[in-house]
Image: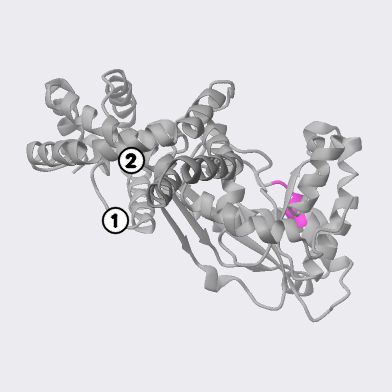
Amino acid sequence: MRAVHKPNLVYTLLRPYVDLCTRFSYRRAQIWGRDRIPANCEIILLPNHCNALMDALVVLRTRKGPTAFGCRADLFNNKFLAEILYSLRILPMVRVRDGLKNVLKNYESMDYIVDAMENDLPFCMFCEGTHRTKHSLLPIKKGGIRTALHAIGHKKDVKKDVYLMPIGLEYGDYFRFRSTSLVEFGDPINLSEYMRQHPDEAQAETYRNLEAQLKERMSSLITYIPDDENHDGTWALTKIMNAGRRGSLRRIRERNRKTVARILSEEKLQNLREEALDFEDHRKAARISLYSLGHRRQGTRVLLKSLLWLVWLPLFLVCSIIGLPLWLTSELTITKVADRAFHNSVRCALKVLLTPLFFIIYAVLGFIFLPWWAAAAGLVLYIISYSCFYDFVEFTRILVSDFRLAFNPDIRKRYKDIISRTA
């Protein structure tokens, strides 16, 4: 195992580029609460885990400085891959599913994590243990708390307290590329202060209390829905009630949270959850997007979007041709990835890996065979081509959905009926 806090040229050079690729994997990406990060301390970042690798990437770009991460330990069995992961400031973390005997190896990782934190490098750990594309939380694992307690027990600088930093991650869509991402830092938990105030508390009680605090603070940073048999119905009704409403990503999240609270507290809304699920099944079968619902002056909206589509089309055709090697590689690759939650991670990773390669190829060929201005223009178009391709495809999908909705009176009627009953 290697120390990850030491200066690293590869990381220093790659970091701004990776952050840029992450940012342009989303149409809108917002970060809130950075002022809540305490200064002059040791920090363990604890986000919810709902969107595979993208969770780590959106957390990474929230800070200018480096951040260390934990990663499933079996990936380090390959020595070449292990060297790459260490250079990216990633340390192995053994999961319970890998066997209780192997979990003991985490104490070796903890020593390196403590070393990194003492050198002002925050450590990020996904405390749910695995990702899940739901607006809920899995049970909080003890790993983050155990690591923080390990740091307190091995502190060299007694002046620095150890903090647990809850983070909420919220996405507009888990599966569609170029959706939206919202990251918000919550109120930190000063674990050192907690231990000073509870010196005689049993360890099991400490874990229970801190897990409860973490869950409460993390759930306040996302659209949290209790993980029970009504979860899907509650989320379906929430989406229907808020269809067509706009605002900042944080405002959208707060609106969703208020709607969820209403549904959970009002019997008439609870009785609509099954109907909302049935409506969602029919809507999806009719291939009508939720983004087509809830708009006034639908005809004017469709007309203006159609005109914009015609204006945008020439640029899309050029970008789709120039970016063909990149987006086609991405789309072919994700067909081999069974878990849809990883599709955006694959698209972003291939953008990071292949963009420089094709840029160099285009630059060489362009400046050999074309005038310099044409080659330069082609490179600019190549840089925006990946985003332009996916944005236009999504725009077209919703525009076609708008036309389908116009010729589907049943969906319109059922939507209006549900909305009228929620008033």
**Depth order, front residue of 12/375:** 375
Residue interval drawn in magenta = 141-145
Total numbered labels placed on residues in the image: 2
Q: Is residue 143 magenta?
A: yes
Q: Secondary structure at mark 1?
A: loop
What color scheme is it? Answer: one colour
Residue located at (80% from left, 63% from top): 5
- Predominant SS along the magenta part: helix
Q: Is residue 308 magenta?
A: no
Residue 194, image quadrant: bottom right
Q: Which tag, 2 or 1, sits closer to the chain's start?
A: 2
Left or right, residue 414 beside residue 290: left
State the residue position of label 1. 247
CA neighbours of label 2 inside 10 A, class few (<14), some (14 to 19), many (20+)? many
Residue located at (42% from left, 51% from top): 372
State the residue position of label 2. 238
Q: Is residue 262 visible?
A: yes
Left or right, residue 191 beside residue 363: right
Residue 203, image quadrant: bottom right
Q: Secondary structure at mark 2?
A: helix
CA neighbours of label 1 inside 10 A, class few (<14), some (14 to 19), many (20+)? few
Query: Of all residues shown, which one is farthest toward the top?
Result: 285
Label 2 – label 1 distance at C-alpha: 16 Å
Tell me residue 200's x, y (percent).
83, 67
Residue located at (75% from left, 54% from top): 89
In the rendered view, would you say 139 is above or below 213? above
Tell me residue 157's x, y (percent).
84, 78
What amino acid is labelled 1 in the image? Gly
Q: Is residue 48 visible?
A: no
